[in-house]
Amino acid sequence: MPENDRKPSLRFKGFNDAWEQRKLSALIVDGGSGGTPSTSNPNYYNGTIPFLSITDISNSDGYIFDTEKHINNEGLRSSAAWIVPAESISLAMYASVGKVAILKENTATSQAFYNLVFDNSTTRNIVFQILKKKEINNEWMPVISTGTQANLNAEKVRETVVAIPINIEEQKKISSLLFKLDSLITLHQRKYDKLVSVKKALLDKMFPENGNDVPKVRFKGFTDAWEQRKLGELGNTFTGLSGKSSSDFGHGSGRFVTYMNVFTNPIADTSRVEPIEIDKNQKEIQYGDIFFTTSSETPEEVGMSSIWLGNNENTYLNSFCFGFRPTFKFDPYYIAYLLRSDIVRQPMILLAQGISRYNISKTKAMDIELSMPKIKEQEKIGAFLYYLDNLITLHQRKHEKLQNIKKALLSKMFA
């Protein structure tokens, strides 16, 4: 397709005109880089002028409503920065290269940004979505300078050519659809973040702190003191796969639970297993077994637990974890979340030994004390946290699905 006859593959009905090629510099009324005040003078940051940093844009969903730092007029003058008008686009030229956001208030920015000011929201909105496409698809790569730090420069940004609809109504329709999609993506991200925070708070409060025999938050009708039991009193340990070489994996009718399945899931994903030859000399796992990671690059990742609720035959545990088979009856969901709470994780982390790689002794892990209410209360707690986990997963999946839809639309709706 000739450069002067660019058309997208997906369009709203009724629009057939070719799109025009325009430099970004021709679409803005003002533009320029920001500036960062000297960090040697902390007084520069004692002000009311919002100051956009790379951290802010890295954590943004595309719209900057507030920033972590604020500067004063002295800081503004010392950095030769300017106050970028609200509703402008800020484009990261360092660190998070290519990431864009719309400023919702007059804001100063660091020198890591090129700021684009428009005289109307229609042009701004369509350019924002074009730049989002470039960000998502890594289309800045050919013009990024490499060295000590990858970066764009102001001139390359200004000279960038983009295809834009000639028809204003087409611009509006495209932008309206994509911004609505952005709102849905943001909605599910915020619901996900909120539920994750709620879960973390509940994990801290629904299990007794050290020295206490009742939790801070409790379901109505339960008043009994909780019992303290060492993990080793509740079952026995077993090892994962042993005596295997790389040639034993990737084929066969047997299956084994992967390290990452254990690491990432308090309740193991029964479909997340890999093939291996059946070996009757290995310990088969069974419903209710608990797995612990034995080794990692950081202490915080050692001793991560996962409970197995499958009934698959000829299934084993990977060699980088150890198993625990309970001899004491407890609710599997309760124990899954208890073992992932800070009350258990903190003493587990303290057991990690190593320098470049950390390991945990399963013998010492068995000395960790667990708080155990009666089975009915365990079932209440386990069912509630499992329900909360399902809500978190639901919003996470919706967020990911909408992101994929937007990525596909950005690729097809722009020439």
Image: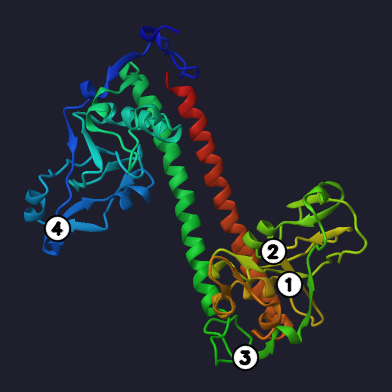
What amino acid is at disc 1?
A: Pro
State the residue at coordinates (68%, 57%): 261
Upstream in the sequence, badge 2 or badge 4?
4
Labelled disc at residue 267: 2
x, y (%) of residue 249?
A: 80, 49
Upstream in the sequence, badge 2 or badge 1?
2
Instruction: State the residue position of label 4.
Output: 48
Secondary element at tag 2: loop
x, y (%) of residue 35?
A: 17, 46
Secondary element at tag 1: helix
Asked whether disc 2 touches disc 1, contact meaning CB atoms under 8 Å apart, the reply is yes
Whole-number angstrom distance, CA of label 2 to CA of label 1: 9 Å
Q: Which residue lies most toward the right here?
A: 280
State the residue at coordinates (64%, 90%): 226
Asked whether disc 1 touches disc 3, contact meaning CB atoms under 8 Å apart, the reply is no
Instruction: State the residue position of label 1.
Output: 332
Give neighbour class at mark 1: few <14, some 14-19, many 20+ (Cα, 10 Å): many
Q: In the image, is 78 to the left or to the right of 12?
A: left
State the residue at coordinates (59%, 79%): 351
x, y (%) of residue 70?
A: 18, 57
